[in-house]
Image: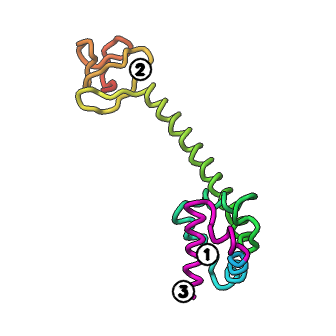
Amino acid sequence: DAILLTFVCKVAEELSNYSRSFALEGVNAVCAVRILNGVMPLFRWPDLFFKVIMKLKGSGHLANLLSEGGPLHNFNWCQQWMQGLSSHQRDVEMRLRRSEAALREAEIDEDNKARQFRRCPHCNEMFGVDQVNCGVFYCGRDAHGANGPAVGGRAVQGGYG
């Protein structure tokens, strides 16, 4: 069992780091493929195998290894993982679309705030900007020195600021 564990982890490590396994190529390739095909359906060997790859390189690299033309594509015990990765990919794409929509909403909200509000340079509080005024206020008085807050160039009581 220890030898099999070492073999499975070594093949997974080589596939992770080099996108190929030296055991699956060359003189002993037929024997290595026979061992993997015989051992992997038993217990939870594929889980260990794929977790090693995922830990070292992630799901994108694993998808490349399982894709057509990849070194794991023709193994029967990989079919279940190929199907799982495609559903995982759909889930990731759905979460990405939701995140992009939330980002667009946040950008629109921030653009509106930038147009409609300013911060007082004295107290750092937010205040609304009237369409008519210049948008420069200092805590209850306008920046132009008039007595009291001004909106549209006229002094008002209880204005912004």
Residue reaching furthest to the bottom: 1
Sequence-earlier tag: 1 or 3? 3
The crowding category of the residue bearing disc 1, from other C-alpha atoms within 10 Å (few below 14, some 14 to 19, many at least 20), is few
The residue at 65%/52% (across/down) is 93
Element marked by disc 2: loop
The crowding category of the residue bearing disc 2, from other C-alpha atoms within 10 Å (few below 14, some 14 to 19, many at least 20), is some
Residue type at tag 3:
Ala
Sequence-earlier tag: 1 or 2? 1
* Vertical relation: 105 (above or below) 18: above
- Residue 47, disc: 1
Left/right placement of residue 161 relative to residue 76 reads left
Residue wearing tag 2: 130
Measure the C-alpha gap from mark 1 to mark 2: 62 Å
Decide whether residue 39 is among the magenta residues: no
Quarter of the picture containing the N terminus is: bottom right
Element marked by disc 1: helix
Measure the C-alpha gap from mark 1 to mark 3: 17 Å
Residue wearing tag 3: 2
Which of discs 2 and 3 lies nearer the camera? The answer is 3
Magenta extent: 1-30
Decide whether residue 14 is among the magenta residues: yes
Q: Quadrant of residue 116?
A: top left
Sequence-earlier tag: 2 or 3? 3
The residue at 23%/13% (across/down) is 145
